[in-house]
Amino acid sequence: MQHLPKAEHDALREYFFQRRHMNRTVRQKDLLLDMSPTMQGRVAVHLHREWLPEVRWISGGSAGFIASIALAFELACYAQQEVIAGDQFHVVNRGVVVRGFKVLSSGMVWGIDAILTSDRLRDLSPARALTFVEVSGVTRPLAPSTTLRLTSAFSCSYMYVFLA
């Protein structure tokens, strides 16, 4: 790292400085794993209360289902101007991204169509980090136990969408 150009060195330093926040989020996930299933559900609902109302197929599920999604999240950090793939369900934990013509900031989501099995029905357009960004993402396929709960929650949401 000693022979990097100054601009690259500064960018790398800023990246690791900003990434420190992600370590706290990783510790929260580790704590969730040490809890009972009921406590996991309650804490997961509390931790994700900012964005949960935006995603009906998750918020309509049980606390245990929400905990399963929370535990399935993988954290990632992106430096300014990096491209973020659009093939996952994402939650912006920190920073600002642009996707299409929409600016997304902390607590906002994209890729809620990740539960669809046909890519032709999904919006797979990527996002771009406007600032340093920390996101949580869930890829398909989810773990079998989560997929089973997801199928049950989705069938209820599916009925709700068509009955509403």
Image (spheres, rainbow, N blue to C red):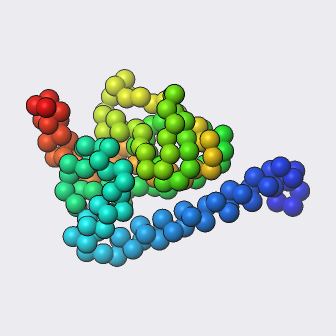
Q: Is residue 19 above or below residue 140?
A: below
Left or right? Give the position of 164 relative to 7.
Answer: left
Which residue: 51% across, 69% down?
24
Q: Quadrant of the C terminus?
A: top left
Q: Is residue 54 above or below residue 113?
A: below
Give whichever of 127, 119 is nearer the camera: 127
Judge whether residue 138 can be spotted in this image.
Answer: yes
Q: Quadrant of the N terminus?
A: bottom right
Left or right? Give the position of 60 relative to 24.
Answer: left
Q: What is the x, y in percent for residue 8? A: 80, 50
Quarter location, residue 116: top left
Which residue: 18% across, 40% down?
157
Q: Is residue 85 above or below residue 34?
A: above
Q: Is residue 96 above or below residue 69?
A: above
Left or right? Give the position of 61 relative to 124.
Answer: left
Q: What is the x, y in percent for residue 4? A: 85, 53
Judge whether residue 144 can be spotted in this image.
Answer: no
Give whichever of 64, 141 is nearer the camera: 64
Which residue: 25% across, 43% down?
56
Left or right? Give the position of 64 relative to 130.
Answer: left
